[in-house]
Image (tube, helix red, strand yellow):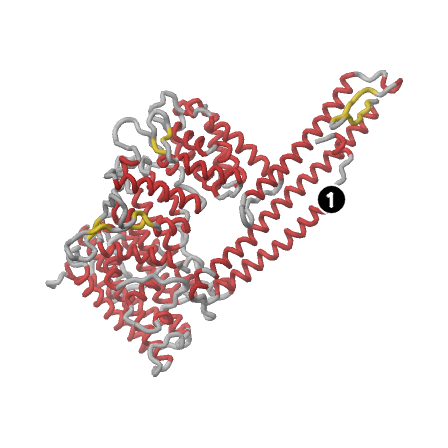
Amino acid sequence: MDFDTLLHAKFGTLDSALTDWNTLVTNLEKLEKDASGGLKGAAAKADWQGVNSQVGRKFIDKTAGEFGDAHTQATSIRNIIRDTLGELKKFKTDLEGEIATARLQMVSVVPSGKNFTAKAMDGDAGKDVKQSTVDGVRDRIDGILRSAAESDSSAAKVLRALVDQAEKGFGDAKYADRDQAADAMRTAEDLAALAKKDPSKMSEAEFDRLLAGLTKYSGDDLFASTFAHRLGAQGTLDFWAQLNDPNSRDHAADGKRYDQYKDLQKQLGLTLANATQSASPDMTRWKFDMLQAVEKPVGGNYGVSGYVVMSNLMRWGDYDDDFLTQYGGNMLAKEQEGVRNGARPEQIWGYHGGGLWPHLNTTGTDFGFDPMTGYMKALSNSPDAATEFFNSEFIAKDTENNPFTRDTDSNGKKGHIGLSNFQYLFEEREWMQEEDSEGEDSISGKNYLAAALEAATTGHPAGELPTSATSVHSEEQAKLYGDIVKSVSENPSRLTDNSFMSDSMGQISAEYMADIHRGLSPVTENKDLLYPVQGAAAKLGEQDLTRFMYAVGQNPEGYAALTVGQHAYTAAAMEYHFAHPEAFVNDDRYTPTQNMEVAISDIARNAGEIQGTLGAGRAYAAELDAGNKDAEFNDAITKAGELGESLVGIGVGVGTASMVGPGGVIVGGIAETVAGEIIGSLTEGMMKDSSGEVIYRNGEEIEATRDSTFRLVEKAAQEAGEKTDSPSPHIVALVGREAEIGFGDAQDRIRDFVDGVGVPKALEKDK
């Protein structure tokens, strides 16, 4: 900061700029509220159909989010300008004060080029001034100028970095003042320099400082992008590979921080994920460099693949979708080339077992030898990238040396086939045999594959609950779910041999319950009116659904999710049609009430068929385990209550005036709906069957499941009629009969569709 510039600074323009930014922040705050409460709320209530259901609503949600980001970014910029302006005004006042004080001490301070000169006044006035007094004046003014320069330059640096975060639109970095942002960037530079050092030379204090810094700042946008840029793509790989080098004689922190490696892995991964969301030129280059760096071996002693190193840092956070899909596409292209040459994944990625090999995953689930495992975990956090990835082509039918063949025509002859990424990973890939930290076979690879499929088909990260926004499925999401159902139907062992994947399959299916009802329903006309869906509907066949649900039903978590999903949907659909008897028209000659009876009968029959199929799966699992799994199934139902409440909030795929208020919120709350009561009865064990047993507590006996199903379906119809002021004992009795028909149909189809795979003794054909 020039002496003369600060001394004669005029802050009028900056004051006006601050006033303008204050006004902008106020206006954007109002726009954000209007967008989220008005625009987005109206979109949540609207009955979207056709292309609009997939494009229009998503566009509105994104637009509303942009208003929020604009308000956040404007607030951060305003805060930084306000903070810097206040500091510069203070520094100017301090400078004027020092000059006045110096004058009283008979020391003159005058401009000298861009700097200044301090000296004793000429003549008698300055004859007794000591040099130490002059030096004191000079040092204090130097300090003011340095502080002013730091304030000005750091503000400029931070503002440029903020604006660079988003290539289009606005960033969501939030800072209360300039110091907060500047400290984050300064800390990032210091820690990146530390990580660039040889990890084996890192002291305990340095390790602790790195971990503490990443833990504190991993969610800070400017810190993350600055840290990643300064460390560099190759530096990132080198750091994690060298830190875990088993051949090194020297270890970080003298080997006293091994138990904290998992925390460092997580916080480093979160930081990098955050950094990739930045569209700054520096991070654009970093992402390009990383896609090149992973193609080469990392680490001098063992030369592990760059993909293996980076994938182990991708298990946390939401990575940029474009980066994630490019990374995964390149990685699978490398694996495809190896597979066509007859190599297995462990050979492709360099792991041959034995010897000293780096354990690049320190969480205990697996040792990180397979790069696909960490990448699947990354996809499970990034739904849009997951959808695009799984629907992409892995290998074309006519590719040279294509090793994949099947008898697709049932003529006894196999021919080459093309595969999507989903088909390769779910049906064909030979996943590496790994162990967890307890020495048991690791399930993490396929388990994370299931989680990634959950994200890809539902539109939300795996493990999160659905919302009305994520319930609108795209064509790509719906197609992928259809592919999953068909794949399991073709070979149920793909799921039953990996039962741990069924919790995700159950969660997915619970969110596609309208699609499942469509697939089971014999109704051919106006099915859109009977089972309305916002967005695309998955194309599901009855045989495929039977075999799929039977497989999922053999797992406690999968069974519970589908059971809760079915009852939530059945109750919501019944209430919807009771409230809107004109909604479905099966026959123009029928009255609205007669058409409504057809609709509710179909819903009840499907409910019986779904529960009959799931109940058979549960019964078969109980037989295999001598009934010991019953407690696990019951506990899983109880724990599925939160999922049930979320599904109730979604409803049947349309917003109705009688149930939904502003913002898509159910009027009166979830408990006031029929579905809310049904889910509470189911998961809290409030309902009992005819024998006095709590509903669904005896899964080994199929007849007990049958009775439990009838009780809940009849209760749903009864409550729906009462809540809509149109009670009908006739319909209540009717749904009981229809559910029984559906339950019986399920048993027949299981005998026909899954015989040979294994069915409960009660359903064997000779019975």
Residue name at image x 37 percent, y 27 percent = 299
Residue name at image x 37 percent, y 75 percent = 584
Nearer to the camera, 93 or 683:
93
Q: Position of residue 649 (x, y in %)?
A: 42, 61
Residue 244 against residue 63 in the figure, above or below? above
In the displayed structure image, the side of residue 540 where residue 409 appears, left or right = left
User: Which quadrant is the N terminus positioned in?
Assistant: top right
Label 1 Cα crowd, 10 Å radius (few <14 / some 14-19 / many 20+) = few
Residue 231 against residue 760 in the figure, above or below? above
Nearer to the camera, 428 or 644:
428
Residue 242 against residue 419 in the figure, above or below? above
Q: Position of residue 242 (x, y in %)?
A: 39, 27
Q: Position of residue 78 (x, y in %)?
A: 64, 45
Query: What is the count of numbered marks?
Result: 1
Q: Position of residue 73 (x, y in %)?
A: 59, 47
| Farthest-out residue, bottom | 589
> Residue 180 is drawn in which quadrant?
top right
Mark 1 secondary-structure assignment = helix
In the displayed structure image, the side of residue 104 where residue 529 appears, left or right = left
- Tell me which amino acid carries mark 1: Thr
Residue name at image x 53 percent, y 46 percent = 167
Residue name at image x 49 percent, y 66 percent = 661
Residue 311 against residue 389 in the figure, above or below? above
| Farthest-out residue, right | 124
- Check disc 1 and report the residue beneath it: 13
User: Which quadrant is the C terminus positioned in?
Assistant: bottom left
> Residue 33 is drawn in which quadrant?
bottom right
